[in-house]
Image (cartoon, grey):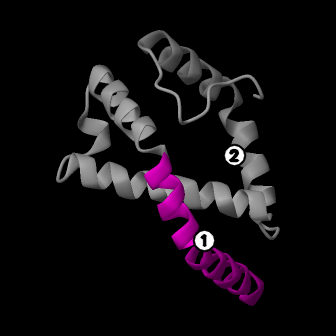
Amino acid sequence: MANTETQDEALSKAARMKKSRLMKMKGKMIARKREISMKKKASPEKIKKRAMKTARDILTKKILKDRSKSDLSISGKEGLEKKLNAKAAVIKKIAKKIIPQIKKAETERLAKMKEK
């Protein structure tokens, strides 16, 4: 999976279909690995990655307003990704601000898990 496109890149229809086939094949294995990794504390890189994703989601909601991302056409999704790529600096700035919240959520998640 090292050679798949990152979320930051705009995907063409062919690339989306390829990714769909890949996920269909490896989905169960990825889900199992995720389940195992969720029992461990997240690394600083993982926390930074989560913060970046949350920041992208915040900007996506702001750009789409009341529409859902799943309602967009393929060309609409490509356009959205290009807009998000243009706002990379803003995404980094937002991510840096929300890292403490992500860390707090991570410690709460682990505490809840140990409770069970």
Q: Is residue 55 above or below residue 64?
A: below
Q: Is residue 88 above or below residue 71?
A: below
The answer to if 82 sits in the magenta stretch is: no
Q: Is residue 20 above or below residue 62?
A: above
* Left or right: where 99 falls relative to 36: left
Residue extent of the magenta highlight = 89-116
Q: Residues within 10 Å of mark 1 (few under 14, many from 20)?
A: some
Question: Which mark, residue 31?
Answer: 2
Q: Residues within 10 Å of mark 2 (few under 14, many from 20)?
A: few
Q: 17 or 66: nearer the eye?
A: 66
Q: Name the spot of residue 51 as percent of width and height, x first.
A: 57, 61
Q: Residue at x 34, y 49 (%)?
A: 60
The quadrant of the rendering that contains the C terminus is bottom right
For label 1, the residue is 99
Q: Name the spot of residue 58 as percent of width and height, x first.
A: 38, 58
Examine the image and state in which quarter residue 73 appears: top left
The amino acid beneath tag 1 is Ile
The amino acid beneath tag 2 is Ala
Which circle's residue, 1 or 2, is located before the other in the chain? 2
Q: Residue at x 25, y 46 (%)?
A: 68
The quadrant of the rendering that contains the N terminus is top right
Which residue in the rendered view is the most extreme toward the top?
14
Examine the image and state in which quarter residue 20 appears: top right
Principal secondary structure, stretch drawn in magenta:
helix
Which residue in the rendered view is the most extreme toward the bottom?
115
The answer to if 101 sits in the magenta stretch is: yes
